[in-house]
Structure formats: structure tokens, C-alpha cells
């Protein structure tokens, strides 16, 4: 009778790097170990009063203090209505200041900040305006001196004719207006009085000796800055 001998089953040995077989071992996962089998400790809970992560609904005490401080230092906003003080020697135009008030309110400028802007800009704007008026009057004088109707070589003679009409019809208020605005230099104003002077001279409406002919257009309106 044949006898069968059973060979006990053993675990297949595992090879190591140096070729020596190592006994097989049952490896059980370690819940406290990581991927490499090293022991890992559970993360400790944050201590009370320490900084917390973003998004947990809590902010550090220092941030709240800074926010409260910033809110207390906010600059003064725009008033309900600006009260403008004109710089020395400057007259403020109401329509211009109304537009400035609208812009200042849109920018939320305080009364002090808006007034500082006016103090800086108003004198420069006034000086610029005076320079523009002077340049315009100089252009009028040049045009009048070379006008084809009354200017040129007979300018002095024709200005005497214009002055005759001015003396006959102009009121003191009208003379003052011409002097203040410089319109006495405008060629169309001089043309009007020149034609009127010719008309009254031809009709003989004005008696008396004729005025002495001025040398140039500056004698018609002496205070109207006709100097070249």
C-alpha cells in the first residue's frame, strides 16, 4: 500500500536586496502609521485664544481693534451746502461756484478741502482771464487801426468824426461801460460812432466848432486801454 506524505504549506519567503530570503510575515495595517509605516500623532486642537484659520468665522482681536480705529479716523465728508470764501482780490462767479459745488460733492470733499482748492485755483483763473481780455483788446485795437473804412492813413481824422457822435449821444453810463469792458477798442463800436458822426456832420445837427482831430484811435475812449 502506498503511503502519501503531506508536505506542510509554508509562506513563500520574500527576497531582500542582498539576495537573502527573509521569512514571510503577516503585515497588518497600522491605523496610527502613515504610508511609510511611520507613526503619526493626531493633530492637536488649537489652544484657546490662538490665531485660527481663515473661514472659521473668527477674526483676531487685533484686526477688530484696527478696524475700530480706522472707522474713528474717517475724514469729514461733504457738507449739505458749501460756503465759499473769495480769495483776496478775486470775485467768485456764482454759476462757476455752483458747478464746483456739484463736483466737490461728488468727490465727497469736506468744506476745508474744497475751500483749499478754491484758494489755489481762483487767483490763477482770474489772472488767466485778465490776460485773455488784454489779448482780445489788443486784437481789437490792431483791427481798428487797419480798418478799411475808418482806419489807415485817415485814422486820426475819422476818429474825430466818431468822437463827435460819442459826445452828442453817449450817456455817462454808456461811456463807463465802454471803458470798463474795453469795447471802446472794438472796430464795430468805432464804426458805429464814425458813421453816426458823419451823418450828423452832413445834416448839420450839431453846431459849434468841430473837435480837434486826435492823433489815433486812443483819443476816442481815453480810459479804454487803447495803448498798443
Image (spheres, rainbow, N blue to C red):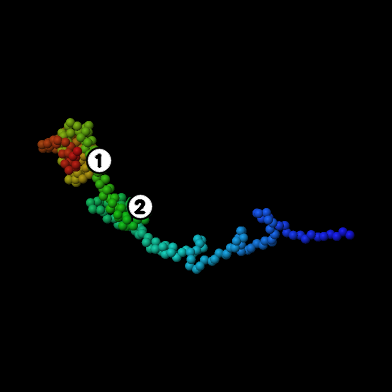
- Which residue lies most toward the bottom here? 48
- In the rendered image, the residue lying farthest to the right is 1
Please state the horizontal and vertical placement of residue 164, each as a whole percent of the image: 15, 38
How packed mark 1 is, by other alpha carbons closer than 10 Å (few <14, some 14-19, many 20 or more), is: some
Image location of residue 214, percent across then percent down: 14, 36
Foreground residue among 137 and 53: 53
Query: Going by the picture, which residue comes out furthest to the left?
Result: 209
Numbered disc 1: secondary structure:
helix
> Callout 2 environment at 10 Å: few (<14), some (14 to 19), or many (20+)?
few
Say whether residue 40 is visible.
Answer: yes
Where the N terminus falls, by quadrant? bottom right
Q: Nearer the viewer, residue 143 or 59?
A: 59
Q: How many marks?
A: 2
Q: Residue at x 32, y 56 (%)?
A: 113
Question: Which residue is disc 1 drawn over?
Answer: 136
Quadrant housing residue 3:
bottom right
Residue drawn at point x = 64 percent, y = 63 percent:
30
Quadrant in which the C terminus is drawn: top left
* Quarter-of-image position of residue 212: top left
Task: Provide the residue designation for mark 2.
Answer: 103
Quick check: 212 left or right of 17? left
Q: Quadrant of residue 39?
A: bottom right
Helix, strand or loop for disc 2: helix
Q: Nearer the viewer, residue 126 or 33?
A: 33
**In terms of depth relative to the viewer, which is nearer, 120 or 143?**
120
Residue 157: x percent and y percent?
15, 33
Q: Evaluate if marks 2 and 1 touch, with contact meaning CB atoms under 8 Å apart.
A: no
Q: Is residue 93 visible?
A: no
Coordinates of residue 201 in the picture (x, y in percent): 15, 35
Residues at marks 2 and 1, CA–CA distance in whole angstroms: 30 Å
Upstream in sequence: badge 2 or badge 1: 2
Residue at 61 percent across and 64 percent down: it is 32
Amino acid at each position: 500500500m502506498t503511503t502519501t506524505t503531506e508536505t506542510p504549506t509554508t509562506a513563500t519567503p520574500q527576497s531582500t536586496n542582498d539576495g537573502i530570503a527573509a521569512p514571510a510575515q503577516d503585515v497588518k495595517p497600522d491605523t496610527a502609521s502613515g504610508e511609510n509605516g511611520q507613526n503619526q500623532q493626531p493633530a492637536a486642537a488649537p489652544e484657546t485664544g490662538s490665531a485660527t484659520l481663515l473661514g472659521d468665522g473668527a477674526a483676531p482681536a487685533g484686526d477688530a481693534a484696527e478696524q475700530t480705529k480706522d472707522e474713528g479716523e474717517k475724514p469729514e465728508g461733504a457738507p449739505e451746502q458749501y460756503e465759499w470764501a473769495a480769495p483776496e482780490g478775486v470775485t467768485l462767479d456764482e454759476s462757476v461756484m455752483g458747478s464746483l459745488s456739484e463736483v466737490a460733492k461728488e468727490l465727497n470733499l469736506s468744506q476745508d478741502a474744497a475751500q483749499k482748492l478754491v484758494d489755489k485755483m481762483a487767483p490763477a483763473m482770474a489772472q488767466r482771464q485778465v490776460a485773455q481780455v488784454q489779448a482780445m483788446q489788443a486784437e481789437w485795437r490792431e483791427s481798428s487801426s487797419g480798418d478799411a473804412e475808418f482806419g489807415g492813413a485817415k485814422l486820426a481824422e475819422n476818429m474825430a468824426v466818431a468822437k463827435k457822435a460819442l459826445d452828442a449821444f453817449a450817456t455817462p453810463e454808456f461811456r463807463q461801460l465802454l471803458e470798463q469792458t474795453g469795447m471802446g477798442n472794438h472796430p464795430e463800436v468805432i464804426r458805429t460812432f464814425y458813421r453816426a458822426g458823419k451823418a450828423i456832420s452832413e445834416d448839420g445837427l450839431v453846431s459849434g466848432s468841430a473837435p480837434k482831430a486826435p492823433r489815433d484811435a486812443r483819443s476816442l475812449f481815453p480810459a479804454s486801454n487803447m495803448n498798443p
